[in-house]
Structures are given as C-alpha cells and as structure tokens.
Amino acid sequence: METPYTKVSGLWNAGMKISGLERGLKKYIMRLPIALPPYPEILEIGCGTAIASFTLLERFPNAHITATDIDPNMLLAAAKIAFKRKVPPERIEFGEADVNNPEEILYLSKEEWTHIKPDSFHCVIASAVMEHSDLEISLPVIARILKPGGCFINIGMSNSIIGKSYGTIFNFPVIAPEEFSRMLRINNFDEISVIPFLWNEFPTNLTRIGIIAKKRKLS
C-alpha cells in the first residue's frame, strides 16, 4: 500500500540520521524504565526503517522482534539495513500490517497472512504512528496481543508548535497525552506514565513525547 512516506522510503533512514532524530530517539529508548524477560517477544507497529526495533535489539540482544509497517517500501528499506548490520534473521522479522489491525501480518518471508494469537508479546512499541490510527480500533487489538503485565510504549507527536506542524504537513491529528492515557485506561491498561524527552535528546525532544503503560494482569 502506498503511503505519504512511500516516495521518501529510500532516504528516510539517512534523513533521520542527518537531522539527529535517530540519535535522540535511540537515547530515549535506551533509558526508558522497562524490564523484560530474558527472551522477550517484541512487536513494533509502523516501524518505518525500524530504528526503534534495532535500538531494542541493542538493549535486549536476546529479543525476537516483529517489525511491521503498512508500506512495503519501508519494510524493504528496513530489511536492507538489517542485512547490512548483519542482524541474525532469527532476531528480527519484517511484515506488512495495518496499524488498526496489527494482529494480521503478512511476513516478507511468507505468502499468506498470519493471525497473531492473544497474549503473544511482552512489549509493543509504536513511534509516530498511532496518530494515523483509530484508537477505538487499534488499542483493543494491541491490548489483546500483549501478555498480561506486558508493556506498550507509544512515542507520539507532542503538542509543541513543531509537532503540530508535522501533523499539518502529513495530515494527522496530534493526540494530547491526557487523551491517550484516558484511552489506555479504557482498554485494560494501567501503570501509565508520560515520559518527556530530555534536552540532550535534541532535536527529537522538539516533536515527540512518550507514554508507557502495562496491560492489566489477570486477577
């Protein structure tokens, strides 16, 4: 499926590096207060060139990551980066999926769609993509495929002037942290924390803000 990012997919990673956005995002993810089991299953939704996935692999080298995006060109660009970095194929898989329905994945290595079972992932991360979703549709699915006690990390666009400008350019709404937190509580999440970017994570701190939440454990 072609998206507004399709035409720039080949240059996306270079642009993130040159602008400093990748550096800031990596520093932020590396310091997030998250604890995962020794061999965690992680899903990235709307991975783009998979900066978040590669960073989580640095932090959790025994993780298995499923990186998804609706744009096949972005997935191919991410897969090429993984190959150049010699990331073992058993550590990361790439597949096509809609942000509103992340439990249906068409892996690059397969010809048929795969349905993800409930309680499959220890962690789900999304970076600047939930703004493109309908939260009433996407959040229940994310909650369903997370294990009880699993964490959801959303790195969204901030309410800053620059963040709102991005929304105008790419035609998406900026979701206030208070509203996102409210939607998380409705969808079986608790222990919700809003975690701002720090000054030394410039320039990413100008446009992004993060929220971490955990799926409620069974009583």
Image (cartoon, rainbow, N blue to C red):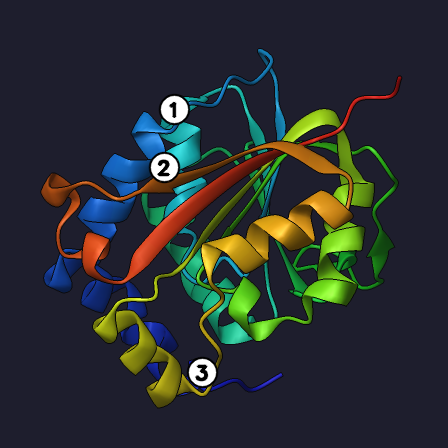
Disc 2 secondary structure class = helix
Using the image as rendered, state which of residue 2 and residue 137 is in the foreground: 137
Rendering coords of residue 198 (x, y %): 19, 40
Disc 1 secondary structure class = helix
Q: Hey, what amino acid is under mark 3?
A: Thr
- Residue at 21 percent of width and 53 percent of height: 205
Res 62 seen here: yes
Residue 166 image-quadrant placement: bottom left
Rendering coords of residue 175 (x, y %): 49, 66
- Residue at 55 percent of width and 32 percent of height: 91
Q: Hey, what amino acid is under mark 2?
A: Thr
Disc 3 secondary structure class = helix
Tell me if 176 is positioned left or right of 145 in this view: left
Q: Hey, what amino acid is under mark 1?
A: Arg
Contact check, label 2 and label 1, Cβ < 8 Å: yes
- Disc 3 target residue: 6
Quadrant position of the C terminus in the picture: top right
Whether 124 is drawn above or below 94: the answer is above
Quadrant position of the N terminus in the picture: bottom right
- Disc 2 target residue: 55
- Residue at 66 percent of width and 32 percent of height: 190
Using the image as rendered, state which of residue 38 and residue 124 is in the foreground: 124
Using the numbered discs, state the Cα–Cα distance from disc 3 to disc 1 in whole angstroms. Answer: 29 Å
Using the numbered discs, state the Cα–Cα distance from disc 2 to disc 3 in whole angstroms. Answer: 23 Å
Residue 36 image-quadrant placement: top right
Tell me if 26 is positioned left or right of 2 in this view: left
Rendering coords of residue 158 (x, y %): 34, 62
- Disc 1 target residue: 59
Q: Determine crowd level at label 1: few under 14, some 14-19, many 20+ residues with C-alpha closer than 10 A.
A: few
Q: Determine crowd level at label 2: few under 14, some 14-19, many 20+ residues with C-alpha closer than 10 A.
A: some
